[in-house]
């Protein structure tokens, strides 16, 4: 499938009435489980990938090539469109972001996310003009071969400024971003304000607004077109592992060895896209 065909296929999932739920995988088996459950697309999670490698997310601790190879693997074994959660685009300059987008196309990704983050915890959000320029560069490189999601991290970086968030998202849409994303708006009212302000550009939400976890149906009624989970499924699985470790340390082997069988893992690995 050509890049333009993959773009059209993936974008169509965002523009249909019900949108899509796009869970995030962190390794081959997790991706296969999500595919087997019937999801039509999956995302990577920079946080889950970094954690799986023993690193901290958001500090440029995972390289562009590592993330590209990871995303390519998930797409190859599942046959699903994969959206790459590529932090700030893996580049110092806007031109570097364009290189990342070209590389993502070459690796067969269906979508790529570009944040306005810096990787610097002391100054985590880029200036407005820099952030917009990087999205503009990503869109120009994409050439409708890959869906570009432009994201502002104001809310999760301690900047609860709804007006600036909408200003950034609107500007991202104006320079051609296909999907917009501001993780964890404070409440449903703020989420609706974002969706309304940037319409008709599709909006992704990470799980829900910050104050309560809503259902898929409730988010769809609010106008959300894509729902992602970030590292939530990874931490859910790690929670099960932590409980098993505690049980095993207490001598309870039976409780520590529940879960799917390794035969089931083998069945998933033998699955053909």
Image: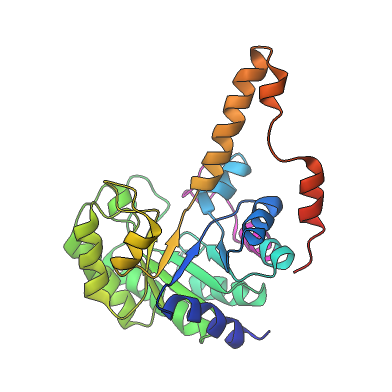
Question: Which quadrant of the figure contains the N terminus?
Answer: bottom right
Q: Nearer the viewer, residue 160 or 126?
A: 160
**Quick check: can you spot residue 145?**
no
Q: State which quadrant residue 7 falls in.
A: bottom right
Judge left or right: residue 230 versus residue 157.
right
Judge left or right: residue 35 versus residue 269.
left
How far across and down, in percent of the image, does residue 240 sit?
A: 58, 33
Judge left or right: residue 90 versus residue 191.
right
How far across and down, in percent of the image, does residue 66 sit?
A: 65, 57
Residue at 57% x, 36% y: name it. Answer: 238
How far across and down, in percent of the image, does residue 88 sit?
A: 45, 62
Q: Which range is magenta?
A: 56-72
Q: Nearer the viewer, residue 221 or 68?
A: 221
Residue at 30% x, 67% y: name it. Answer: 221
How far across and down, in percent of the image, does residue 74 sit?
A: 67, 61
Asked if residue 63 is among those painted magenta in the image, a careful observer would answer yes
Q: Nearer the viewer, residue 110 or 200?
A: 200
Q: Nearer the viewer, residue 261 or 48?
A: 261
User: Residue reaching furthest front?
Assistant: 217
Relative height, residue 174 to residue 122 (above, below): below
Q: How is the image coloured?
A: rainbow
**Quick check: can you spot residue 210?**
yes
Relative height, residue 6 to residue 87 (above, below): below
Question: Which quadrant of the figure contains the C terminus?
Answer: bottom right
- How many numbered discs sit on the rendered protein? 0
């Amino acid at each position: 499938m050509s890049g333009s065909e993959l773009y059209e296929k993936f974008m169509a999932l965002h523009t249909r009435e019900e949108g899509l739920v796009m869970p995030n995988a962190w390794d081959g088996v997790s991706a296969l489980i999500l595919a087997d459950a019937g999801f039509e697309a999956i995302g990577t999670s920079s946080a889950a990938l970094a954690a799986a490698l023993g690193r901290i997310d958001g500090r440029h601790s995972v390289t562009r090539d590592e993330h590209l190879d990871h995303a390519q693997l998930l797409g190859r074994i599942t046959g699903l469109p994969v959206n790459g959660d590529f932090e700030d685009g893996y580049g110092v300059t806007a031109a570097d972001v364009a290189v990342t987008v070209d590389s993502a196309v070459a690796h067969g990704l269906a979508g790529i996310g570009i944040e306005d983050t810096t990787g610097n915890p002391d100054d985590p959000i880029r200036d407005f003009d820099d952030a917009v320029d990087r999205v503009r560069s990503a869109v120009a490189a994409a050439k409708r071969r890959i869906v570009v999601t432009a994201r502002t991290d104001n809310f999760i970086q301690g900047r609860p400024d709804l007006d600036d968030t909408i200003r950034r998202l609107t500007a991202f849409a104006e320079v051609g971003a296909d999907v917009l994303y501001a993780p964890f708006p404070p409440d449903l009212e703020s989420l609706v304000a974002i969706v309304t302000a940037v319409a008709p550009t599709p909006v992704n939400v990470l799980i829900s607004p910050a104050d309560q976890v809503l259902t898929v149906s409730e988010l769809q009624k609010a106008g959300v077109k894509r729902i992602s989970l970030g590292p939530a499924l990874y931490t859910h699985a790690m929670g099960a592992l932590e409980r098993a470790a505690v049980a095993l340390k207490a001598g309870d082997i039976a409780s520590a060895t529940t879960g799917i069988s390794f035969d089931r893992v083998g069945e998933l690995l033998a699955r053909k896209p």
